[in-house]
Amino acid sequence: MNNLLEQINKYKTYNLKFVPVNPDTKKPHEKNGHWKGVDWTDDDFAVARAAGIMHKESNIIAVDYDDAAAWNFRSLLPNNTLTIKTVKGYQQFYSYDGDTKLFAFKADRSPGKGKKIIEVLHNTQSVFLADSRKVIKDVEPYKLNDENEYKSLLFNVGKIGALTYLSKYYPESGAGQRDDYIMRVAGCLVRHSKLSIDEMEDFIERLCIDNNDGEIKNRKDKVKRIKQGYDNKKPTYGITELGSFINVDKSIVGNIFNYINEVKVDKVDPYTALSLTDFIAKEFPPKEYLLYPIIEKGSITQIYGKTGVGKTLFTAGLTLSIASGLDFLKYQNHNKSKTPVLIVDGEMTETDLQERMCEFISSYSDRKIVIDTDRIKLITLGLQMNGGIDPLNFESGQKRLEANIKQIEERWNDKPVIILDNLTYLTSLDEKEGAQVKPFMQWLINLRSDGYTIIFLHHETKSTGTSSGSNMKERPINCSIRMRRPEKNEEDQCTLSRVHLMVVTVEKLRGKAIAKYKKDYVACISEDNAEWTYYEIEKAKPKKELAYQYWIDEGHTSWTEDMKKHEEHSISKSQFYKIQNKQKEKDKENII
């Protein structure tokens, strides 16, 4: 029996299962055209130069330190475990019989085989017994007892990767460079990780020790000061500043901190899938409209326009109608159902908002219309103890708002409509960065999939007249409504006095809707009693069509030279017959 077989038999007492491998290529030998399985014989290993541990069959995962510098931070993981020295680094083996996943910390964002710092291997094999490998800790693999311990290991592997990466850019001593570097790293930890204060301080301490920085206490003390400043809305360094400092693209720097967020274990249950036959036959809940057809229950609606155009006024009208089971302008509450509403206002003062709501309620009361004020809840800046609302693109802001949503749902046994007024002041998004907008929109999509209705207000760009920022937010929404001030000819059509006018354009509307709901109209709110009315916009005919109609009314069916020279109703020969042919085509279409 050769030395390899002796070693294999020894390590089989650790419940490890082996496969013969080529130590140069790391590829397993084949048996009958394939290598998977555990029925290898002594003869198979007798001709092999190396043996590998089969991870899945052995209930083993391997932490592979691809970058030898990552080994400096190994104390973050349980170290009383089977460990080997490889050609380039180290490997530690852990026993775990739960569901596992591949976890790899890459030094860049390269697709495929990007440079790896550290990874966790789970369903292949690791070369274990070979001349190029040396066992440096010969004990049984440490057993991870449950999913939480497994997740903790993955999380700490992420920390090791981040520490290794950041250590490579640690400045030499002198000229305050180290202090500036730690300020930026600590800012990123505060803004872009889920570490506690103690964990962030430990992170900084390990970084200092690895780089022989004797100012450990001074560096650690910065964490609490930066966290306190950030909580008080003070400017705080982030990935952009850190990337600039070390001259690395911010997308790569940002990726570092993805690894020290909470790790979710992959589920092995398959998604639910139906055949098209079963899908068509399945009974789904019918669509329910709070205001047909623009506000469907379980939808996302955007209302945007320039400052002062009337977005908040219009939304207030929607709110009161939805909460009280009323129609609004040309939109019908078909079931006359009363739905609770949660307004999150990040811009108006409490005094102005109170005054506006009182005017509305008084107006409805004068018209003998009852508003269900109990079903409307408001969150404003001034009502909060710290005078602010956590940005809703942060988990803390989302979780707090979700707690409010659940309270309202429990109170009314109905999912509330959530109104966010507005995105600019309720988030800290860089609106032009689609990568920042996408996670926020995913949160709204998740709320929608849970049956909640969301309406968010936003501003309009000055140059293009479109919703401000990346169009990433428009892609998943159900309805987009633009509001603008009326043009002079549109305003002149109004027969009412003392009203605020706004043109309403439904730019996007999923599902079928009668054409009249897609036409622009002018919404009017009385400045005397806050009553809403509207009128359709009558589009003025082009000047040439008016000229053509003038000559037809005068009895002319053919063009003459005098028409071109007429001072008020001038029209060329080609224009006259072009309009005439169009009219004939329309007349044919109208013949039944």
Image: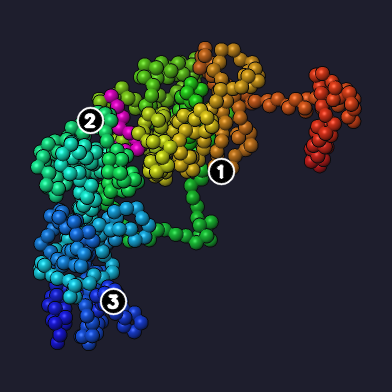
Give the residue type at disc 3: Pro
Q: Nearer the viewer, residue 270 or 199?
A: 199
**Mark linked to residue 28:** 3
Q: Earlier in the sequence, mark 2 or mark 1?
A: 2
Query: In the displayed structure, would residue 104 be above or below residue 447?
Result: below
Q: Is residue 184 above or below residue 269?
A: above
Q: Nearer the viewer, residue 344 or 94?
A: 94
Whether 578 is drawn above or below 126: the answer is above
Which region of the structure is painted magenta? 387-396
In magenta segment, residue 395 = yes
Q: Secondary structure at mark 2?
A: helix
Q: Residue at x 60, y 27 (%)?
A: 521
Which residue bears the numbered disc 2? 229
The N terminus sits in image quarter: bottom left
Query: Do tag 1 and tag 3 residues touch (Cβ < 8 Å)?
Result: no
Q: Residue 361 shows which numbered tag?
A: none
Q: Which mark is residue 511?
A: 1
